[in-house]
Amino acid sequence: MYAILLQKSELALQRKELELTRHEVRGQKEQLEAQNTTLKKQNFENTFFSLIDLYISIVDALEIRSPQLGSPHRDITTKGRECFSNFFFDLKREYEGERKRVPDADDLALCISAYERFAKYRQSDIGHYFSTLYKIIQFVDASEIEEKQIYINILKAQLSSYELSLLFYNCLSNYGLKHFKLYVEKCGLLEHLSLLLAPGHKGLYRESAFRSPPLVSHDCG
């Protein structure tokens, strides 16, 4: 009888030790998972902010020259973010010209035609800019990070009114329609858009393009 009681006591002790071991292993596993999650987030943020720095450097490097009114032999140099106001008014002139040339065309056709005429002489200035913007959004969307919209909002905070307007029309054209427009609508990139060539153009996008999704999400839409 004593031997049986001893065996039961030893068995209970072994079970308790096993449970403690399992608990310890579980705790170590959770700690490793937390460390792995932290490391992934750090790596993600390092790449993300490097891309943001690249975007800023591309904007800062922009430089365009245009003839000074009344002095055709003298140029005015515009640099950095101020270039986007010039780009917008260049696009506006193309749009107004298209409206006169093709008065019966619908809004989408006019926007596409105007932007593509504009891009013929401005693509060398803005091509790398839009390519980098697209890569940043694609990188965030493809990542395993949960709080994607937080990082999209950081990017959105960098964009001026004129940049948003150009993005709007770029994504209607063949330059951005296939992939970029989907991200714009998915991530609410046009939430702060205030400038359009015509108010009715807003209807050329889904409503989701103009509102920000929840901050905590497995994607930005």
Image (cartoon, rainbow, N blue to C red):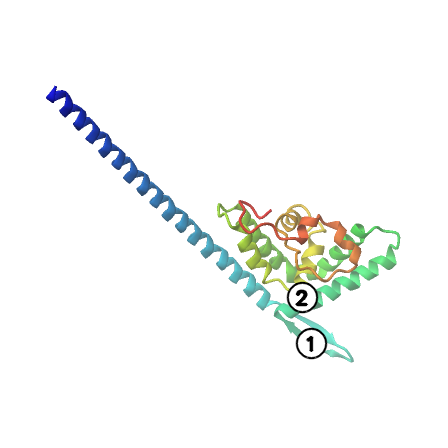
Mark 1: amino acid: Ile
In the rendered image, the residue lying farthest to the top is 1
Which of marks 1 and 2 precedes in the sequence? 1
Element under disc 1:
strand
Q: Quadrant of the N terminus?
A: top left
Q: Is residue 19 above or below residue 66?
A: above
Q: Is 76 in front, or is 176? A: 176
Q: Amino acid at mark 2?
A: Phe
Task: Tell me, yes or no, if residue 63 can be seen here.
Answer: no
As drawn, 17 above or below 166: above
Residue linked to disc 2: 84
- Count residues near mark 1 (Cα–Cα under 10 Å), then give few for <14, some for 14-19, many for 20+: few
Please state which of residues 112 and 24 is positioned toward the viewer in this rendering.
24
Distance (Cα) linking label 2 and label 1: 15 Å
Image position, residue 77 (x, y; %) = 66, 74
- The residue depicted at 53 percent of the width and 60 percent of the height is 52
- Residue furthest toward the bottom? 71
| Tag of residue 76 | 1
Q: Quadrant of residue 111?
A: bottom right
Query: Neighbour class for label 2 at 10 Å: few (<14), some, many (≥20)?
Result: many
Q: Tell me which residue sits at (51%, 50%) in the image.
A: 147
Q: Residue lying furthest front in this view?
A: 1
Task: Name which residue lies at 72% across and 55% down.
Answer: 169
Where is residue 21 shown, x and y percent of the image? Answer: 25, 36
At horizontal 72% and vertical 51% (from top left) the residue drawn is 172
Image position, residue 117 (x, y; %): 76, 57
- Residue 72 relative to residue 14: left or right: right
Secondary element at tag 2:
helix
Q: Is 57 placed left or right of 96 in the picture? A: left
Residue 143 in sight here: yes
* Residue 65's disc number: none
